[in-house]
Amino acid sequence: MIRRASLVIVGALLGATAMSVIYSAGVPAQAAGASTYRELSIFGDVFERVRAQYVTPPDEEKLVENAINGMLTSLDPHSSFMNSRDAEDMRTQTRGEFGGLGIEVTMENELVKVIAPIDDTPAARAGILAGDFISEIDGQPVRGLKLEEAVEKMRGGVKTPIKLTVIRQGADKPLEITVVRDIIAVRAVKSRVEGGDIGYLRVISFTEKTYDDLEKAIKKIKADVPADKLKGYVLDLRLNPGGLLDQAINVSDAFLQRGEVVSTRGRNAEETRRFNAGPGDLTDGKPVIVLVNGGSASASEIVAGALQDLKRATVVGTRSFGKGSVQTIIPLGDAGALRLTTALYYTPSGKSIQGTGIQPDIKVEQPLPPELQGKIKAEGESGLRGHIQGAAETDEGSGSAAYVPPETKDDIQLNYAMDLLHGVKTDPSYPANPDKAAAAIKK
């Protein structure tokens, strides 16, 4: 098993733009042309006029931040400026523990949109759902705020309450939901034995804890179920918005003996990076089924794409989110950091999933219960305004409904996977055959 330590984020945590892939690196800038500097001088003139003549004295720091973010958001939904506080928050989140409500959010139509509540957090317990729009925070309208400002208002002291006004599709009127803030210690991996002979592994997020948690979970399952009785594993990546790239590589590597896990390709050929798996399959070659849906993004898609292309696992579920771009984190000293889209990532077969997502080997829809019908809709990267057009993107787009039933008995996708492992159902794509991977990728 090859462990890697590069700090790379693939995904969105609380306060971050949805579904980012992030490298921590410094990139030298090339000098701009004379015409560009003339345009910058116009910006300087405008700034001075606003600073000196606006009807009320403006906050100069906010003026500059807003100008920078205006430039970056015109590029794509995932490029942004982080001030020093935001940059520190990002570092805190990657450690897998932070203070707050426990929701992954983005900004849409000037409202805070909930991508998903994190399991076992104040937001989840209070009833916040994926797809909810937060219109007011403690009575203050969200419209007019940047995402970072709205997130800052949702933060606060542990055990202090906050009232959110939530617009939910299908509801007759806005909902008032009170959430009590707490320390969010994100459990990276949950596991259990299903049916007495199947190891269930749910990767919730890709933080610094993920690989270690996964390794412990697999060891426990192997200790609880004799090897001759263990039918295989279900790796559940549904509703997983992403996280650290090195963790995505390590999680993939945990099931692989060899092969390229992922590559990233920038504007110039020399920027291409390839990440390979090493010997050491933690599951001893047992069959693996990966579950994905519209809430599976970035790091989740890297793992699903690697195990699918290398034919180590059969992917079951619905089309994933389709976030396939790479953002470089460029430190700016005390000022903060710049998050800039610099590359796309590719699965082992050379496919970019940008705007298309991972198409499962076996499509299994998960119907919504009556009370959620019309409230959760299919969404993906292809639906984000200003997203980078993927090379293989079509009108079909990416994404699907992001819903997982709380009870196993109602989880059609999980039960389908268990039926495959038990031999109750059959499909040509199961079991996956790694020996055929090289031929399939070449084809």
Image (cartoon, grey):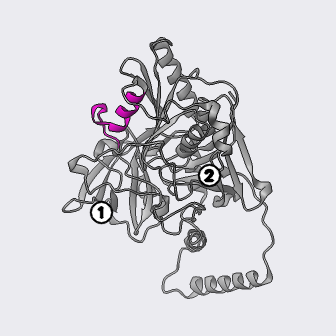
At mark 2, the secondary structure is: loop
Q: Amino acid at mark 2?
A: Lys
Instruction: Kindly report the secondary structure that dominates the magenta region of the rendered protein.
Output: helix
Q: Is residue 391 above or below residue 260?
A: below
Which of 48 and 33 lies nearest the eye of the viewer?
A: 33
Find out whether residue 416 is within the magenta segment: yes
Q: Is residue 283 left or right of residue 411?
A: right
Q: Which mark is residue 139?
A: 1
Give the residue at the far left of this rendering.
172
Of helix, strand and loop, which one carries label 1? Answer: loop
Dot 1 alpha-carbon crowd within 10 angstroms: few under 14, some 14 to 19, many 20 or more: few
Residue 389 rendering spot, x and y as whole percentages: 57, 65
Residue assigned mark 2: 351
**Measuring 57% from the left and 60% from the top, which residue is drawn there?**
392
Q: Residue at x 60, y 38 (%)?
A: 247
Disc 1 residue type? Gly
Task: Locate residue 16 relative to residue 23 in the image: left or right.
Answer: left
In-front residue for pair 391/186: 391
Q: Which portion, as a residue range, is magenta? A: 404-420
